[in-house]
Amino acid sequence: MPQKPKTFRMVYMDFSSARLEEDLRFYSEIMGLRQDGQATADRTWLSLGFDHHNLSFRKGDNSGLEAVGYQLAADIDLDSMAKHLDAAGLAYTRKSDARPGVDELIEVEPIGGHSVHLISAISQTEGTMTTTGVAPLRLGHFAVASAEGAAIKRFYTEVLGFHRTDAFGDVLDFYTCNYEHHVLNVVEAPTAHRLHHLAFQLRETGSHVNAADLLARDSKPIVWGPTRHTAGHNIASYFQDDSKRLVELYTEMDVYLPDLDMMEPRPWHEEIPMRPRRWERGDVAHWRTKFAVELSQF
Ligand SMILES: [Fe+2]
């Protein structure tokens, strides 16, 4: 039987921001996230409309990723997760009331540059999902480049039980803890730890057009895409926010079936069954479109 991941979704990402006002304006007015709760201490919490928050920002000297929060599978509580981390020899802290909407969490000490939070639950907002601006459905995945890439990969696969779905060359690996092809990309790079991109799922593929129109009006051109990727086969558009973070908007992500170790078949797959595989480095556009910039430039 395939392993069962210990988490089933990414819930939130915490950022520092050297351009806090600009980031809050953009993610509120243009992306459509809401500040339902009060800012606490130095941090502002933004929600897509279901979880108490999905993004948070605080003023900082640089615009980096500080923490990522994952929700534990229903049959794993924080006590059993703590024992599991003890057995793996990992350092962590248990915190109560450390953030609004989350009673208790485990904070795993950073591997690479950001810490990992493990939560059992997050309170839900009352009302509806956002329908203003770009109005993404979900915060879907992120990609990091790190000199500690090998340690990050070991943590996600051996400790959290993520599945590896695909790879580019021998440097970039895709991982998932749910039905989507990837929740995380890790690039082993001889650089300091950095976020390569964060990604939101849009409502439907036509939503890329509306998003691009809104972004153009806000002086944020699409820098790569829209195109269909090879690995994951998602339709993807990329732009940069005010802090120069690369942001991906996507639809039609491959659905991973761990029991069959394959992607649910799609007409655009290069092979059927489409199993986890290693792609040639740079072979990222299924439509073979050549863009003026390489994604690896960012
Ligand atoms: Fe992505």
Image (cartoon, helix red, strand yellow):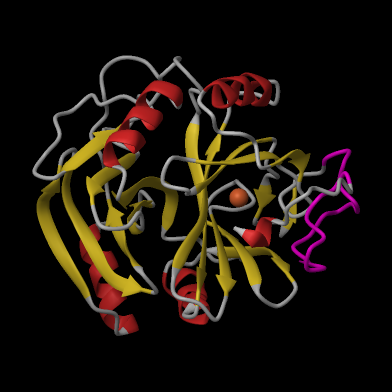
Q: In the shown orientation, is residue 111 left or right of residue 268?
A: left
Q: In the figure, residue 189 lies in which quadrant?
A: bottom right
Q: Main secondary structure of the magenta part?
A: loop
Q: Is 273 in front, or is 14? A: 14
142, above or below 235, in the image: below
Quarter of the C terminus within the rendering:
bottom right
Q: Is 251 in front, or is 293? A: 293
Q: In the shown orientation, is residue 162 left or right of residue 38?
A: right
Q: In the shown orientation, is residue 176 left or right of residue 81?
A: right
Q: Is 271 in front, or is 198? A: 198
The image shows residue 203 at horizontal and vertical percentages of: 59, 24
Question: Residue at position x 21%, y 37% from top?
Answer: 44
Q: In the shown orientation, is residue 172 left or right of residue 266?
A: left
The image shows residue 46 at horizontal and vertical percentages of: 30, 33
107, above or below 256, in the image: below
Question: Residue at position x 26%, y 33% from top?
Answer: 52
Q: In the figure, residue 253 lies in which quadrant?
A: top right
Q: Is 262 in front, or is 135? A: 135
Question: Residue at position x 20%, y 64% from top?
Answer: 79
Count of picture labels:
0
Q: In the figure, residue 123 lies in which quadrant?
A: top left
Quarter of the N terminus within the rendering:
bottom right
Q: Which residues are magenta?
A: 266-287
Q: Is residue 254 magenta?
A: no
The image shows residue 11 at horizontal and vertical percentages of: 37, 44
